Image (cartoon, helix red, strand yellow):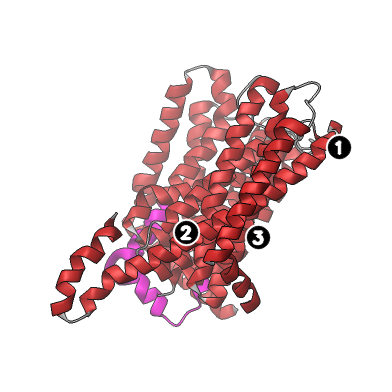
């Protein structure tokens, strides 16, 4: 556990963050080049197909992020170190963002191809339910004021929510007809090799983006905790010094 | 292990005693479920075929919504006079508190479900075929539902959770129960009960996973 913690610390240090930022920018530029210029136009769907280079990596990030929520939740309950909770919280926010992005992009893609924004396709429906589960996770995080209690409650939701996802998938797939093949992934079987390369690059780029966002969000989480601590601390000090400080240090905490 | 079960029985008996003396489920859950059913009926219009087709879904939705109130009620009484602290301080396994509270809610919901089912049969002309399969779906679905609800019911100690967060948490997690329950009921009442077996299997899987998960993690919610 401690080596994982060290790696986490390095990743979220200021310097690692800058390196990640540049890497992200570079990777996204390369992705854009491959997605929009280098990869060929799809024969049937035309340029709309290029949405795949955002849609699939977003979906991948959503699952990656929620897996990290699970890991952070278990690690918090085992070690009781608040940084694991911060990791889970950061990852949940990013996961919710990319789940929503997956659904929105998917809808925009479905309109010209399937003729409708929404079908009750098993994969679509299960993704929407997954979004709701993790919105619930974020809502639970807002309930307790005590950080330790918030971390414990959130960890339980993070674990139970993750366990539920495969059951939701299974139930929704059966719901559309017992022996239906797994939901079709549009166009993938007839993809040109260059398209596959572009998709791989996009997945890697989004993964780096995830690491960068995690580093940023965790630093903000640390700053929030420190701010709260400083805002509350002066009250414990001798009255003479605290009075003047109280006003200045407490003001930003409320914002 | 026998101690855990004995303590769970004591917790369940306590909750059921509260219900028998207070008659909350009968007094407010049943009218609530009735209101939901009437509202569904009005919103879907008087067309007989449509109502008949949607009856299994409406039945489960009424039960699902009413169950959210039942879980909240189950923990409301714990919030009064520091009752939950008393339970936590008692020399019993946390898992037995979870199992006991879940068992009491299961008993209450099963009674409620029989009555709601009768209402749906009367209001929406739901067929009375294969009652065994329907009963199995309700028993299995209720176990899973009670596991989710009794686990996260602890969160309603926070006033903010009581309003929106608790249903937001329970309803999406319980999606497999809704889907499997509705499908099993629909298959049973349209005369193809044999196909309902896989849905009942799904409910069993959900029950096993959530009763196990609840037993394992419930203690973390209570700690203070």
Q: Chain of mark 1?
A: A
On-image quarter of the N terminus of chain B: bottom right
Badge 2 is on which residue?
B152
Real-space CA distance between mark 3 and mark 2, rounded to the nearest whole angstrom: 17 Å
Q: Nearer the viewer, mark 1 or mark 3?
A: 1
State which quadrant residue A40 falls in.
top right
Tell me where residue A104 appears, x and y as whole percent.
58, 33
Tell me where residue B193 appears, x and y as whole percent.
72, 38
Q: Is residue A64 above or below residue A127?
A: below
Q: Secondary structure at mark 1?
A: helix
Tell me where residue A149 appears, x and y as whole percent.
41, 68
Marks 3 and 2 belong to one chain: yes
Q: Is residue A56 visible?
A: no
- Residue A193 got which mark? 1
Q: Residue at left 64%, top 60%?
A: B209
Asked if the residue under mark 2 is in contact with the one under mark 1, i.e. CB atoms within 8 Å, the reply is no
Q: Is residue B74 magenta?
A: yes
Q: How many residues crowd mark 3 within 10 Å: few (<14), some (14–19), many (20+)?
A: some
Left or right: where B141 falls relative to A177: left
Tell me where residue A47 appears, x and y as whole percent.
71, 24
State which quadrant residue B180 falls in.
top right
- Which span is picked out in magenta? B70-95
Badge 3 is on which residue?
B208
């Amino acid at each position: 556990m401690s080596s994982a913690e060290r790696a986490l610390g390095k990743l979220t240090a200021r310097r690692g963050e800058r390196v990640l930022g540049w890497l992200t920018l570079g990777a996204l530029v390369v992705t854009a080049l491959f997605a929009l210029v280098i990869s060929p136009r799809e024969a049937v769907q035309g340029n709309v197909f290029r949405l795949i280079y955002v849609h699939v990596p977003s979906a991948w990030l959503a699952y990656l992020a929620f897996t990290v929520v699970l890991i952070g939740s278990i690690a918090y309950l085992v070690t009781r170190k608040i940084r694991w909770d911060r990791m889970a919280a950061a990852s949940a926010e990013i996961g919710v963002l990319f789940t929503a992005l997956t659904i929105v992009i998917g809808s925009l893609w479905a309109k010209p191809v399937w003729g409708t924004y929404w079908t009750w396709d098993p994969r679509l429906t299960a993704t929407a339910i997954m979004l709701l589960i993790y919105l619930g996770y974020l809502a639970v995080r807002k309930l307790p004021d005590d950080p330790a209690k918030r971390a414990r409650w959130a960890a339980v939701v993070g674990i139970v929510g993750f366990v539920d996802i495969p059951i939701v998938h299974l139930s929704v797939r059966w719901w559309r007809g017992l022996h239906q093949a797994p939901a079709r992934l549009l166009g993938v079987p007839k993809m040109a090799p260059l398209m596959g390369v572009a998709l791989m690059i996009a997945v890697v780029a989004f993964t780096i983006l995830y690491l960068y966002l995690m580093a940023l969000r965790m630093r903000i989480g640390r700053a929030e905790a420190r701010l709260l601590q400083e805002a509350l601390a002066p009250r414990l000090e001798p009255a003479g010094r605290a009075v003047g400080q109280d006003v200045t240090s407490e003001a930003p905490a409320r914002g | 292990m026998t101690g855990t079960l004995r303590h769970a029985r004591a917790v369940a008996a306590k909750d059921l005693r509260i219900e028998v003396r207070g008659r909350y489920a009968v007094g407010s859950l049943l009218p609530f479920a009735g209101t939901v059913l009437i509202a569904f009926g009005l919103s879907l219009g008087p067309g007989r075929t449509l109502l008949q087709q949607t009856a299994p879904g409406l039945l489960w939705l009424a039960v699902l919504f009413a169950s959210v109130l039942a879980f909240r009620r189950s923990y409301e009484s714990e919030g009064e006079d520091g009752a939950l602290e008393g339970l936590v301080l008692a020399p019993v396994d946390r898992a037995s508190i979870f199992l006991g509270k879940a068992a009491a809610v299961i008993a209450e919901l099963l009674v409620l479900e029989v009555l709601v089912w009768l209402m749906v049969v009367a209001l929406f002309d739901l067929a009375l075929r294969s009652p065994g399969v329907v009963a199995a779906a309700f028993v299995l679905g209720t176990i899973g539902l009670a596991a989710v609800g009794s686990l996260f019911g602890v969160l309603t100690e926070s006033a903010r959770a009581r309003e929106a967060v608790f249903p937001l948490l329970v309803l999406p997690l319980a999606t497999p129960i809704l889907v499997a329950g509705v499908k099993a009921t629909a298959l049973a009442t349209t005369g193809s009960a044999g196909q309902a077996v896989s849905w009942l299997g799904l409910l069993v899987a959900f029950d096993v996973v959530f009763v196990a998960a609840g037993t394992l993690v419930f203690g973390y919610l209570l700690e203070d």
